[in-house]
Amino acid sequence: MGSGKVTDWQGKRVTVAGLGVSGVPAAKVLHGLGAHVTVVNDGDDERARAQAAELEAFGVTVRLGDGATLPEGTELIVTAPGWKPDKPLFTAAHEAGVPVWGDVELAWRLRGPDAAPWLAVTGTNGKTTTVQMLASILTAAGLRTAAVGNIGVSLLDAVLGDEKYDVLAVELSSYQLHWAPSLRAHSAAVLNLAPDHLDWHGSMEAYAADKGRIYEGNQVACVYNAADKATEDLVREADVEEGCRAIGFTLGTPAPSQLGVVDGILVDRAFVENRHQNAQELAEVSDVNPPAPHNVANALAAAALARAFGVPATAVRDGLRAFTPDAHRIAHVADVDGVAYVDDSKATNTHAAEASLAAYESIVWIAGGLAKGATFDELVAKSAKRLRAAVLIGADRALIRDALARHAPEVPVVDLDRTDTGAMLAAVREARRLAVAGDTVLLAPACASMDMFANYNRRGEAFAEAVRELDA
């Protein structure tokens, strides 16, 4: 398919798999480049029909309710990231020798010759926050940047729009990386690795391998988590440019070629002269919002990528101070009778919940929802000593209840047999009854929300509304 110049696309037969957030812009861009575009989509609901009508008005062919067969003459498939690799469409493409790209691969191929380099971030948890922190630091350094990829501006818009960037902060999911074989970042970070999306990838090994693709061809730095050996292993396996360095981040004292924490200060022993003797102060832990341990780790990863790009230490401090986290990520809602109420509805898997629980000493834990195949023994065993009580809601709460019985039998548990939307108010009232001054009531469900709520945002809002009702 060549370098993606307009002449390469004229008359090319491209099939776009899936409408949705990435499919519609991809179809429009390809059509605008002169390709013959056919969109195939499994679903045929009201939203899909509206999107199809919009594309057909452009002159794009759309086939609804048929995502399995390969349109005749297809020379390339551009897929939405969520489509599983084992779909019949991809089997047919493989047999016909037709390449499959994701929207990220398409954006990468369409960049101009003087395109902005990419600083890329992946990991099971913390991606969005880290990319937003990174964009804030780059902005503080006076660079033109944007947080793109899985968040914010679409990657296609960022590489094809009129806005000129110096550097892009790019969030990439394992799905997107799976379909982006030629992506080569300036520098990249894998924040952590825990079982997630295994139904999509088929195994933990396949999931890790897709995450590890982010390091392929890195030019300056492969940033890994010193506390998570799996991320360091991925760096070892990566084929990088000559001179690219492995840079670790740690919540402890950093070794040479690492960033870490000393006496409440974030320090850099990687991007300094004579790193065996010297360290550069970057910021204080109190500059990180919120200063929970896992979020300090996010800040160190963002700082490492920014420093790899040559950003001065003062910009790290100013960028972290200017950063405000998204809603429902360890958000302090209110203090009621000396008890803090914290909304971390975004903790939709056990790894995220574990990080959240580690941030507080004495917790009344509100948890439960859709487990997505997860098990809870390790989470409960690691967090047991911090739990004062637990209030369980949602479809798969019995899995958490059983783990609590095994690993924290002395912790009182309230099992709310409800999945209606009023359940959250009941849960917050129970939590209030169980909490004493100095405790934190923490919504860190360790589960997805769709059994009870439209999404984790709605779940977090329901929690905050219930807390405000207490306060009133």
Image (cartoon, grey):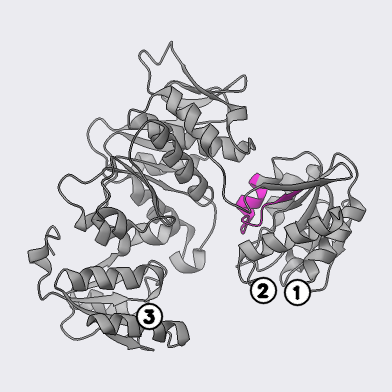
Residue 224 in the image: state x and y as whole percent.
44, 38
Q: Residues within 10 Å of mark 3 (few under 14, many from 20)?
A: some
Give the alpha-carbon distance from disc 1 to disc 3, as whole Å.
Answer: 32 Å
Residue 142 in the image: state x and y as whole percent.
36, 32
Give the alpha-carbon distance from disc 2 to disc 3, as whole Å.
Answer: 27 Å
Residue that numbered label 2 is attached to: 451
Q: Amino acid at mark 2?
A: Asp
Question: Of marks 2 and 3, which one's residue comes earlier in the chain?
Answer: 3
- SS at badge 1: loop
* Residue 226 visible in the displayed image: no
Question: Of marks 2 and 1, which one's residue comes earlier in the chain?
Answer: 1
| Badge number at residue 171 | none
Question: Of marks 1 and 3, which one's residue comes earlier in the chain?
Answer: 3
Whether residues under marks 2 and 1 lie with C-beta atoms below 8 angstroms apart, the answer is yes
- SS at badge 2: loop
- Quarter of the image where one finds residue 144: top left
